[in-house]
Structures are given as structure tokens and as C-alpha cells.
Amino acid sequence: MNGPSFHSVTLDPAKCKGCTTCVRFCPTEAIRVRKGRAAIIDDRCIDCGECIRTCPNNAKKAVSDPLTVLESYAVRVAIPAPTLYGQFDERFSVDRILGGLLELGFTDVFEVARGAELVADATAAWIASAGEAGSGGQWISSACPAVVKLLQVRFPSLLDRLVPVMSPMEAAARIVKERLYPGRTDVGVFFISPCAGKVTVSRFPQGLTESAVDGVIAIKDIYVPLLNALPGVHERPLGHAGARGVAWAHIDGESDAVGVPKAISVSGIADVIGVFEALENGKMKHVAFIEALACPAGCVGGPLTVENPYIARARIRAIERKAAELPPREARFEGAAINLGLEVPVPARSGLRLAPDVFKAMIMLEEAEIIHESLPGLDCGSCGAPTCRAFAEDVARGDAMLTDCIFKLRENVRKLAEELINMERWQPPGLDKD
């Protein structure tokens, strides 16, 4: 199997109208429309949530854990993404929001923003020690799971440029289990997530043998209960992360925290693809570090959020300014630092191959080329595939018929009609027409 059998991004067939909007916007051509309904190709899906964001019928959704999952653990620790803070207006401070999570049934909270600060330090140290060895100097952040999967599926040649440091979510979860509650088996760690990708990697980790996260709860699912609880929450010092960690919620936050010269930040899956194509073609030689985020404006633009990403970003920036003016709070854990490095290499995924067998794939590729040359090249999407080339590959694989193309169908109908007319006109020799 090329990838996980589970994907957070799923389809609600009852809402799908077969409009092909999702087909056009999917960055890895993982969606087809067949028999009037969209279908997701598991091996190609990167759980970026672009289809959730663009579907006009709300037929795409992300599967996450319900709040009832907390009942399985005696100790229930929430690790909220800093994006959560930007969902609420200025009346509610970070401390108050964290206190609101305790009101919902969590027994403890630990900020992912604190984990982000440690990941930023580990990333800076790695780049300083590794330099330009083996990659030409252009290192790519491994924090966004959808971006890592994009590399696996579409840009496998760039995988050796990933910084081998775990995500802030995993760092925070490891701290909770290894430092705050060492040796206990009744501790559940739950990430409050802005994106679908985190749900998938909590079950099928990237670069790790096992995730320390026990569940992922969508921000949109916890927003209303938390909003209702906040007015009754009293201020108490629960937050320990500074401005560097909180800033990871939006674009530029990670690169600023890492502090590497010649760093660039890019958000939105289409722009990320453009940067990676330029990098692959050797056009990014003066860049040392790339902060790449699949969602527009960064994690504040995640498909599981509720607030406008630019409003949320402005709120986060206000929190950063306030945090920068205050003295740092005492750290919540002591002792030796945990290992933040990846444990296993991140492998390429053959989602774009025509067949697992190389020889068979070459034959199918040649067949696809012949089919593609016979197509109109309009990329209209009427066949249910994003492009004529993708449709040609589907036909070569046996997943579609040539007559699914309306132009080829019309061509065949015209030929059949001409044959019928010719048969009607043809008379056997020696017979006179009455």
C-alpha cells in the first residue's frame, strides 16, 4: 500500500452534485467524478482540505474525534493549536480560552505554541549544523502535514530537503507524556486542530513510528461549547508560550521564530506547488529555508476553523504584541529536553504512478500518450477528470472509458451515423431500387 488506508477528508455522497469544482482545484488530481458523484483516490489524497474549502455544496468534510473521546482517559490533556486563540474576540485572553477548555472536561492544558518554540530552536540548530550538505542549502519545514504529503506524492526528489524535526503538535504531546505525566498509561492527549491533515497524521505519523496524540478535535466542533463556557471562566495563569510560539498560527510565524537568514514563507497549496516547482528546477538557489503551509494565510486559514483567516490573523498579532511586553512565565516542565528529531525517513508515495510494476507502467504510459494525442486538449472536466492527460491515464488504467469524453462520444456517434447512412444507400449488385 502506498499510503494510509484512512483519510480525514471524506465525501458525503448525498450532498455531491457532480459539479467537478473539487476536481479542478485538487492539487494532486486525487478526485474524479464518476456516475454523477465525486470519488477520492486514496493514494493521491494529501488531506490538504482544498476540496472542503472549494466545494459549493459542502459535500466534502473532515472526520475528527468527538468530545466524547475524552471519556476513555482519567487524565485528559488538551493541546490547542495557537490558531484557536484567533477564533475569539479580544474579550477573551489566552489564559481564559485555556481555562474554558478545562470547563469542557479536560483536566489539563498544554500549549502547542510552547512546543512550536522548541521546534523552532531545534530547526535552527539543525540547519546551522547541517548547512548546505546534501541539499544545496534549501531546507523545507516539516511542520505542515499536507505539505509533507505533497512532497511524497508530487515532489519526491525534494524529500531529502525536509528538516527532520517533528511538528509542534507531536512535540507538545511528547512533552505531556514524557515530562508532565511520565510513566502513566491513563493520560490522553488531544489536539485542537484547524486542519484535516493533523487528524490523519495522528493515526499515520510522518517520520515517526507512533504518534503521541490520542485524538484530534476540530476547532469548528469545539467552538460553540467553548464560546458558551468562556463568559463564566475566571482569569488564571495557564498560558506559558511567548510571541514566537503563538505566531506559528499564521504565515511568517515559523520562519521568524526559526530566525534563519534568507528564509521565505509561502501559503496556499497552489503557491506552495509553484515554489516547489521552482526549487526542483534549480531556481531557488538563494533561499535557505522554506516555510510552506497548505492553507491560505497559514493555519488560521485551515478548513476546520470558523473565523475569517485575516481577522483571526489580526487577533493573533495582537496577542503576540501583548505577549512580547510581558515577562516570560516559568516553564511547565523541567529536566532534559526531549528528542524532537524524526525517527524514520519520510518515504515517497507512488500515488501518481500508473502501475506498481515499472514495465507495465511504461506500457500504460505509452498507451496514455496515444490516447492523449487523440483528445481535444480542452481540459473541460466533462469526463470527470481534471485534465485530458489525467483522463488518458484513467483510460489506460481501465478506470474510465474513452467515450466518457463527450468529444470522443460525439465523434463515435457521428461515425456510426455515417456508417448507417452508407448502409442505407448501399445496394447489392444486380438489384434495382423500386
Image (cartoon, grey):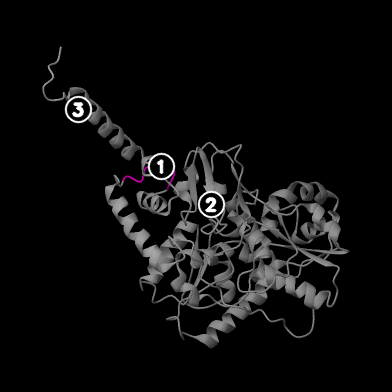
Q: Quadrant of residue 404?
A: top left
Query: Mark 1 or mark 3: which is in front?
Result: 3
Q: Is residue 331 visible?
A: no
Q: Quadrant of residue 119?
A: bottom right
Count of marks overlaid on the render = 3
> Is the C-beta separation of discs 1 and 3 under 8 Å?
no
For the residue marked with disc 2, what is the amino acid?
Glu
Residue 279 on image: x %, y %: 40, 71
Residue located at (36% from left, 64% from top): 362
Residue that badge 1 annotates: 383
Kindly state the secondary structure of the residue where label 3 is placed: helix
Residue that badge 2 annotates: 50
Query: Mark 2 or mark 3: which is in front?
Result: 3
- As drawn, which residue projects farthest toward the bottom? 129
For the residue marked with disc 3, what is the amino acid?
Asn
Q: Which residues are magenta?
A: 378-385
Query: Considering only vertical position in the picture, is 175 above or below 27?
Result: below
Q: CA distance from mark 2 to mark 1?
A: 21 Å
Residue located at (48% from left, 38% from top): 19
Task: Confirm whether the magenta stretch covers residue 384.
Answer: yes
